Image (cartoon, helix red, strand yellow):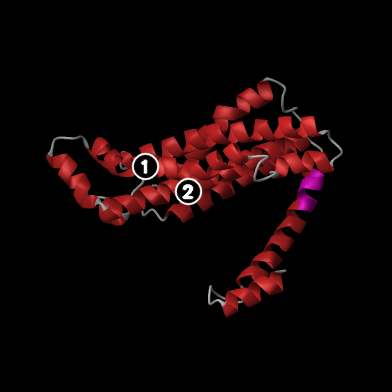
Amino acid sequence: MAVAAGVLYRVTAIGSVWAVPSAGIRATVQLAAIAGVLAAALRHLWSSVLVLAVMFAVASVTAARRCRAGRGSLWLSLSLALGLLAVLPVLLGSGVVPMTGVAVVPIVAIVLGNTMTGVSVAARLALDALALRIGEVEAALSLGLRERDARMEVIGGSAATALLPTLDSTRTVGLVTLPGAFVGVLLSTGSATQAGAVQILVLIALLLAQTCGVAVAVELIARGVITRPRHRHGA
């Protein structure tokens, strides 16, 4: 399949013939390494927390790089942290997710990964919007709006756009797609009812975590905490 995708890349001039095969090889190596680490780490709660700390650090750096900000991009780690804090106390405190490494790590990883994607997309779209529509920001300032409000007039739609994929996935779950958590429970001999309950839990947690993370990211950009060089002295 990787070779077939590579051939299609070449024939249709989408990109390098090695794009898909190299991605597949990289994924194989990474999953082999993480499988070995997790096999040992999930035996103890403290080592599971350490694994999650590493994941959080990687997610923060990845989000910062993807948004292509010139300054303050690492503040996106605050967005990720608040996204997790919005759901983890409820999941863990209620006992829905047991306080064991084998339960905590997968759930937190799913929430963190999706929140990272939403935050980085929202931040990049917002910064792109500021670059393209700086004149509108200046016009709003000339009308007496505060800097934060002037920027928000331009970038407010970025949040909704970034949240749309997860929202659509939730709306079409079971009709168009069978997500990973659902399939995973079924493959581990769980019942369809258990699989559905786990998947709903994950989807709602994702929506809340992403909403919090994206809202914070857009607010940081509106307040000038995260910028690109050309906007440092702008609106």
Per the model, the C-alpha gap separating discs 2 and 1 is 15 Å
Relative to residue 90, is residue 12 depicted above or below? below
Residue 118 in percent (x, y) is at 50, 44
Q: Quadrant of residue 113?
A: top right
* Figure label count: 2
Which residue is pictured at 60% across the width and 71% down the height? Answer: 19
Q: Residue furthest top?
A: 94
Whether residue 71 is visible here, answered yes or no, is no
**Where is the N terminus found, in terms of image quarters?**
bottom right
Residue beneath label 1, please?
157
Q: Quadrant of residue 98?
A: top right
**Where is the C terminus found, in terms of image quarters?**
top left
Q: Residue furthest right?
A: 189
State whether the magenta stretch is mostly helix, strand or loop. Answer: helix
- Disc 1 residue type? Gly
Which residue is pictured at 36% across the width and 47% down the height? Answer: 126
The dot on residue 181 is none
Residue 202 in percent (x, y) is at 65, 35
Residue 151 in percent (x, y) is at 27, 42
The dot on residue 120 is 2
Q: Residues within 10 Å of mark 2 (few under 14, many from 20)?
A: many
- Disc 2 residue type? Ser
* Disc 2 secondary structure class: helix
Relative to residue 11, is residue 158 depicted above or below? above
